[in-house]
Image (spheres, rainbow, N blue to C red):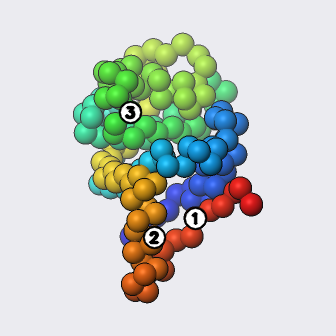
Amino acid sequence: MLVLGNISFLPFSALKDSRFPPLTREELPKLFCSVSLLTNFEDASDYLDWEVGIHGIRIEFINEKGVKRTATYLPEVAKEQDWDQIQTIDSLLRKGGFKAPITNDFRKTIKLTRYRSEKVTISYAEYMASRQHCFQNGTLHAPPLYNHYS
């Protein structure tokens, strides 16, 4: 079964995320879109039961206020940042809002789920060519472009 998590956030993330300036029309030809399909979810035996560059990880923990929190990194994140397992876990705790000092004893309380990812990337030019091909052949309905300029 394919689960599409947080798909309602896609337009917001792409177009209204205040951390980034809005895209301009001139930037469109330079865009790439990547989608990661997350697979093979497994409960880990402890917070170190995963491999950097192979597994993505999702952690669950109870923060210093007693609130359950979660956070995740895709498999490529730790490798791209050149982090080891401890650095990755600590960064993920901070990403998840944990503000207290991080100790080895606290790390042992984390519930970790590991997973793998299959990532595909398409350039704007490839998307437009595929879209045009679909319309010319009339065999598929290509997804419309989201036009936030009109």
Q: Nearer the viewer, residue 102 or 124?
A: 124
Q: Position of residue 52 (x, y in %)?
A: 27, 31
Residue designated by label 3: 77
Q: Is residue 57 shown above or below 120?
A: above
Q: Quadrant of residue 64?
A: top right
Identify the residue at horizontal 39%, vertical 54% (top origin). 122
Which comes sooner in the sequence, label 3 or label 2? Answer: 3
Say whether residue 138 is left or right of residue 84.
right
Amino acid type of the residue that numbered disc 2 sits on in the rendered structure: Arg
Q: Position of residue 141 (x, y in %)?
A: 48, 80
Q: Position of residue 97 (x, y in %)?
A: 60, 28
Identify the residue at horizontal 64%, vertical 35% (top origin). 20
Q: Dividing the image into 4 quarters, which one contains the N terminus?
A: bottom left
Can residue 25 be seen? yes
Residue designated by label 1: 145
The Cα atoms of the two marked residues, 1 and 3, are separated by 29 Å
Q: Return the mark for residue 131.
A: 2
Residues at discs 1 and 2 in contact (Cβ within 8 Å): yes
* Residue at the farthest bottom position: 138
Disc nearest the viewer among 3 and 2: 2
Q: Dividing the image into 4 quarters, which one contains the C terminus?
A: bottom right
